[in-house]
Image (cartoon, rainbow, N blue to C red):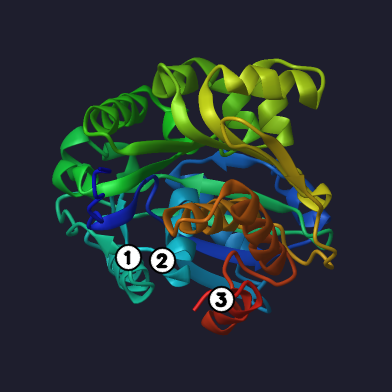
């Protein structure tokens, strides 16, 4: 007789930066003029970010503000599709902190209370060029003070999946928090998933990333550049073999060429969805959120892969890292989800 599985309180427990994202359309000239590395995520101090905000004040035509951070975007997407989700991050008791919590709660995601002692909520400027490439400058603010105590262990133990962003490894303190969170999840029988997040992060902080991965994760998300970089491979086939050593299952996104997944036994791929790219910001985040929603809803990897690929294409075809609720419903109808 099989053991009946009891549904847990949360499908997904996310851990990552809690940022207020402001997305602005810019020119390549603007990036060059202000010495901003195109297509990268760069950590900046408050002074540098204030300087850029002032320089960007003339770019008011297209501006979007939302609660963000990579894992946060994924958790919001999963929640909008129908997952029960919790997010652990750190904001301050300032105006941006209030905005973050309100925006997150509006998406149906549970979040721990604001810790009023800490100075400034983190912010990310997302600059999008006409070729749809996104460039991010991030001031972490209160996120740098994230401690192990602030990752709610009771809520994590009551979750089916843990999902963490790779950006956590950009300093030793948060790497340690991520390591402890991963170890606790494994002890509690919570399935573990991680995104490698960014080619630059993978290259520069590979040792910290390896500490967080430890003896392996249940599911790894990465794009092709990150897969090649982390496994130090020259081609995708070698990278796939390398990833099998650190993840039971994994997904490699390949932009317009679709995505490849390994479900523990079978390697599978899906074609890219033809769409006019307006803004690539949030595509990887949406992919992970949609994929996690699918597998926590009992779908297999093949279905999840096709679904997540379609969801990511919707994000790319519009300005901003999110799609509206109408789009979520259209996608669900398209895939027969009720």
Query: Residue at point 44% right, 47% down?
Result: 46
Q: Which residue is mark 3?
A: 328
In the picture, which quadrant includes the N terminus?
top left
The image quadrant that residue 218 belongs to is top left
Mark toward the viewer: 2 or 1? 2
Q: Which residue is mark 1?
A: 109
Question: Which tag, 3 or 1, sits closer to the chain's start?
Answer: 1
* Residue 262 place in picture, x, y as percent: 63, 35
Question: Which tag, 3 or 2, sits closer to the chain's start?
Answer: 2
Query: Residue at point 74% right, 63% down?
Result: 26
- Is residue 314 in sight in this rendering? yes
Query: Residue at point 37% right, 22% down?
Result: 172
Q: Is residue 188 left or right of residue 249?
A: left
The image quadrant that residue 275 belongs to is bottom right
Q: Are marks 2 and 1 in contact (CB under 8 Å)?
A: yes
Element class at badge 3 = helix
Q: Which residue is mark 2?
A: 79
Q: Is 240 or 326 nearer to us in this picture?
A: 240
- Is residue 50 in sight in this rendering? no
Element class at badge 1 = loop
């Amino acid at each position: 007789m099989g053991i009946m599985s009891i549904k847990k309180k949360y499908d997904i427990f996310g851990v990552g930066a809690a940022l207020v994202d402001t997305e602005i359309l810019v020119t390549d000239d603007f990036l060059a003029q202000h010495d901003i590395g195109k297509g990268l995520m760069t950590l900046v101090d408050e002074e540098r970010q204030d300087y850029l905000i002032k320089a960007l004040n003339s770019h008011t035509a297209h501006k979007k503000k939302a609660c963000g951070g990579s894992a946060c975007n994924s958790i919001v997407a999963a929640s909008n599709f129908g997952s029960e989700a919790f997010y652990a991050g750190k904001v301050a008791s300032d105006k941006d902190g209030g905005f973050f919590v309100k925006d997150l709660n509006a998406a149906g995601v549970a979040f721990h209370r604001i810790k009023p002692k800490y100075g400034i909520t983190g912010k990310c400027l997302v600059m999008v060029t006409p070729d749809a490439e996104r460039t991010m400058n991030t001031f972490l603010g209160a996120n740098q003070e994230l401690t192990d105590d602030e990752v709610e262990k009771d809520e994590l133990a009551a979750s089916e999946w843990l999902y963490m962003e790779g950006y956590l490894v950009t300093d030793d303190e948060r790497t340690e928090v991520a390591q402890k969170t991963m170890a606790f999840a494994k002890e509690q029988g919570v399935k573990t998933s991680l995104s490698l997040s960014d080619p630059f992060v993978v290259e520069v902080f590979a040792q910290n990333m390896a500490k967080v991965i430890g003896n392996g994760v249940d599911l790894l998300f990465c794009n092709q550049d990150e897969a090649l970089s982390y496994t130090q491979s020259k081609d995708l086939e070698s990278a796939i073999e390398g990833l099998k050593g650190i993840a039971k299952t994994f997904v490699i996104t390949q932009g317009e060429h679709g995505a490849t997944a390994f479900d523990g036994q079978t390697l599978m791929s899906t074609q890219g969805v033809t769409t006019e790219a307006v803004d690539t910001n949030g595509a990887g985040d949406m992919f992970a959120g949609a994929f996690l929603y699918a597998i926590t809803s009992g779908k297999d990897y093949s279905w999840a892969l096709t679904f997540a690929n379609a969801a990511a294409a919707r994000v790319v075809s519009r300005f901003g890292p999110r799609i509206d609720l109408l789009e979520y419903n259209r996608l669900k109808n398209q895939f027969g989800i009720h």
